[in-house]
Each structure stands twice: as C-alpha cells, then as structure tokens.
Image: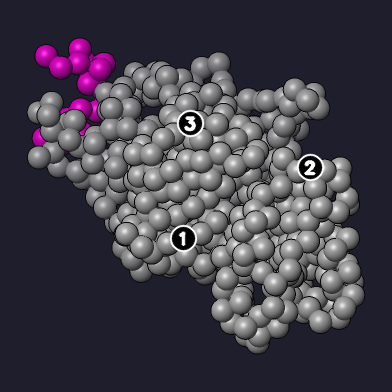
Amino acid sequence: MIQADAEILSVRRDGAYYHMSFAAPGIADGFRPGHFVAIAVDDAHILRRAFSIRSASTKAGGALQIIVSPKGPGTQWLVRRRAGDIINVIAPLGQPFRLPTEPVPCVLVGGGYGVAPLFELANQLRARGCGVEIIVGAGDAARLHGVVEARRVSDAVHVTTDDGSAGEQGRVTDPLRRILAEGRHPAVYACGPMAMLQAVSEVSAEFGAVAQCAVEESMACGVGVCMTCVLPVIGDDGVTRMVRSCTDGPVFFGDRVRWSEVGTVPADTLGSPEARDD
Amino acid sequence: MTDPRVTLAGVEFAGPAFTASGCAAAGKELAGFFDLTEIGGVVTKSIMMRPRSGRPTPRMVETPSGMLNSIGLQGPGIESFLANDLPWLAERGVAAVVSIAGETVEEYAQLARILRNEPDVKAIEVNISCPNVESRGQVFACDVMSASSVIHQVRRNTSSTVPIFAKLSPDVTSIAEIALSCHNAGADGFSMINTTLGMAIDTDTLRPILGGVTGGLSGPAIRPIAVRNVWQVHHVLPDVPILGMGGIATGEDALQFIAAGATAVSVGTMTFHDPSAPLRVQQELLGLLDERGFASVSEAVGVAHRGGLV
C-alpha cells in the first residue's frame, strides 16, 4: 500500500462514465483484481473517494486505470481534472478476489461500472486456464460499461439491461441462472450494486457455486480507521460481526454477507444492543 | 530547532501531535503511512468493557468542510484490546493513550481498575461524551455532576503516575464550568473538543441520513469552535494541560490551538483525508514554532493570552 501524488495521464468520457488513468509508481506491482484506490478530491470535500482498480500497467513506471461515475461533487471534481494535474492516491487497498487453484470455468458478473475490476480478473483467470464467461448488466444501454472489452477477455459475453435498450431485457441473474444450470461453473465473481450482489449470491448458492462479491459501501477513509463502511458478515466461527469493507473486503464470499440485513445491525451480531442486554 | 518533546501532566511524549480517538483505530492501520513513534502518541478508539457492534449504516455524511458520524463506539471490548492492540503498540515503542468509555459510572471505574495493571498505558483519556444509561441517556460530558463523578471514579482507580484526561464536549453552555468540576474531581488534563452534535436529512426521502439519526460533526468546520473552547478553558485553568483538537489539518491550525492554550494537539478527521496527517502536522507545527523563535512547544502554550508575539 502506497500513498503518492499521482500525475493524471488521461481523462476520457465513455457513455455515462469516465476512464481515468494516472501514473502510480510502485503501486501497479502490488495490484490484484479487486483492489481499490482511495483518492483525495478537492479541499471542500475532506473524504477520499474509493474506486475499483480497472487495470494496472507496470510500463513506464506504472499506471492505474479507474472508471468514474460522476454522480456527486467529489467525482464531478475528479472528472474535470486534466492530463498533468496531480491527485493524491492510496493504493492498492483491500482484499482482492481469490483465484481458484484449479483451472475451472468461471462466471463474472458486473453491474454498471461495477464491471471495472472484472477485465483484469478475466485475464488472470484465463492465464490459469480457467474458462471465463462475463455477464454485463445495467439499467439501460447508457449505463452499460465495457461490453467490447469484456468480449476481448472472455469466451462469451452476455448483456442485460432492465429496459431492454441493449442486449437481453432482464437482470444479470437471468443469464447467470442459465449458465449455472449447465452445472459446470463452480466459481462466480461479481461487482456492482448491493441488490445485484445479493441476487447473484442467492442464485450462486442455489446451484452450489461459490460467489465472491466486491461490495460498494460508502467509505470515509478507505484504510480501516473510521469504521464507516461496515456490513454484517458471518465469520469462520459462525459469529456475525460488523466488518469493514475497506480492510476485510471489499471482496467477500457471497454466502457470508447478510445481504438483506445490510444497513442494520442484526440482533445476533457480536456486541449488538440486543446481545449486550442479555 | 524547536524541541519536539512535550510533557503532559508529568508524562513526556516524543512530539506535540497525537492521533485522535476514533480516527486512528488502535494505531496499526496507520503504521504503513508514517512512523508512529515519531509523533506524541496514539490515542486509541474508545475502549468499552464488552464488544460493541456500533450503529447501523449509513454512519457517515460528508458536510461542508467536515463530516457527521454515528459510528456508535464499535469496538472489540477491553479484553481483546489488551490481548491484541495494546501489546502491538508497546512492542513498537508507540506511546499509548487509551481512551475509555462506559454507559455507567461503574463501567468507567471497572475499566480504570483493569488498566491499572497495564504498564504500557501512558495516559488515559476519559471519553465522557457517552449517554448515561442511568440518567435517561443524558450525556455525561454535558452535566457537571455526571462528568465529575466519572472523573472521580477513574482517578481513584488509576495509578497516580498515569494522568487522566477528560474529553470535553462543546455541546454545553459553559465549557469552563465543566472543566473546573472535572479538574476538581481529579482530571489531570483535558482533551478537547469532542464532536458537536449535528444532523442531516436526505432531501429525496425526507428522512435523517444517518442510521443513528443524529451524529457528531467533525473536521475543519468545527475548528473555530474548538479554538474558542480551548481558549476559555485555558483562561480559567492555565496550568492544566490541554490536548487540543477539532479540524486540525495543517501546522498553522495546530499553532492556533497551542497559542490558545493547548500543550499538544490531536489530528482526527483529517487523518481520513490524509493518513499521514498527524506526522505532517507535527513537522509543520515545529517548523512554524522554530520560525517564530520558540525553543520548545511549551513556551508557546497560551501565548495568545499573553499578548502574542512581542
């Protein structure tokens, strides 16, 4: 993990999102798919913004690429930066996706710009001999990201939109269900909105596949000190704890996250108000 | 060069900047960003008797030059803290200022009794900004009697060589009155200020954003409030050390606190922006003191009360 002033190499609009690339000496070497970067924005907004790292190149001293959805003042500030501007970054952060030890067929599911970390994941899976199918979904065609890139790094791509404006009308779980019904895919990787991750985890469990999900929780620090980005996760000991998505995640096993209780403290959580009153 | 060492209630620390409780966990996470032994010390997240899950999310709202939080004192409890976190700090030679919090006066006393056997505790910060379950949830720090009974109990259960700092809330009519009563009850110093209570509402749902409904406001937005509080307490108790905090982002910010009467400073929320901030602020502060001709930090403490630079 390195904190550095990084020079922006490019900012390029792509549909509803922006591609951003910046020089990141030393950071690219430690990058694994699923890692994220925490970026300081303008002085008026004191909290860092966290982004999945889309790719990292070790050429020319190293560079990182991210996808930015400019939906708030911090991200809007960020996409107004130009090549040559300097931003302060901390990366690589978090627990990355775990790769299978055997060359097994895998399904990768990305919702909206949540597809960002899946391209490099696909590359690494294929380098290990794993088959890769990618499902790319979004609300509508404008918010789809990376379909062309997905085709380049996988054996098959399935596209869904809620409104049918691109690909198949429906949810990412529709093709996921069909693929898993073939009974050949033991591993599912997903990144996207929480509701999607919950649905992917449930469908995966139904077919006995292991799902790993990179969550998007709002963070304040990204480095484990603020305790903002917590969610209820069941540990190896069967006990539910409020764990940090920045340091314990962002990648979690889908069957360990109590998805329907995210945003609450379940009564049987270690140290919950109910548990303390016993 | 200005001597970086500071003495707080008889205990010497390597530098004038500390982390702030709740903004540094128990220190470990920041070790990758700077050498924790170079700053004054790590003020831990408040430790309670038992593990505590904290509040539901959302726990944070970004606000102009600040943030609101309603973490709800999530933590592993003192047993885990003593087994894992305190030894980690001690083995590395990091000065540990242990923050404690309770829901009853007796819980604070219990925590103090347990810490009494721990030689690696350099000082105790008593976080009295907790709801008192025995007094309809009234925050200890906002009531003279509750605040002083907690301090009294912690003081009488703590070794005389370990100073205790009362963490004061700005959400009171007279900070000086609370400070005086805590001092009379045995507080060796003050940590100030804690967050000030705030709230934000989602204009789409028209509901409070925070899971905890209200939350503590921190960051540069509250800095002038903090400087004023430090000024007022130093005015009535000029010989009592203050660990000053509230939106410190730079050495200049820290210097305001020192001049207002703080002996040392804590860097809190700005650690979220820049995890290296505590050491950076310390270096900047020492540079500014040096430029102004101060041989030590203590020479500058409260200088604004004495007519400033002459």
Question: Residue under circle 1?
Answer: A56
Residue occupying the point 23% across, 41% down: B283
Tags 1 and 3 on a common chain: yes
Q: Disc 2 sits on a residue from what chain?
A: A
Question: Secondary structure beneath disc 1?
Answer: strand
Residue occupying the point 31% across, 63% down: B93
Q: Earlier in the sequence, mark 1 or mark 3?
A: 1
Q: Amino acid at mark 1?
A: Ala
Q: Amino acid at mark 3?
A: Arg
Q: CA distance from mark 1 to mark 2?
A: 28 Å
Question: Residue under circle 2?
Answer: A140
Mark closer to the observer (1, 2): 2
Q: Residues within 10 Å of mark 3 (few under 14, many from 20)?
A: few
Residue occupying the point 63% across, 34% down: A71
Q: Disc 3 sits on a residue from what chain?
A: A
In the rendered image, which quarter is residue A94 located in?
Answer: bottom right
Q: Earlier in the sequence, mark 1 or mark 2?
A: 1
Q: Disc 1 sits on a residue from what chain?
A: A
Looking at this view, name the residue that lies furthest to the bottom: A102
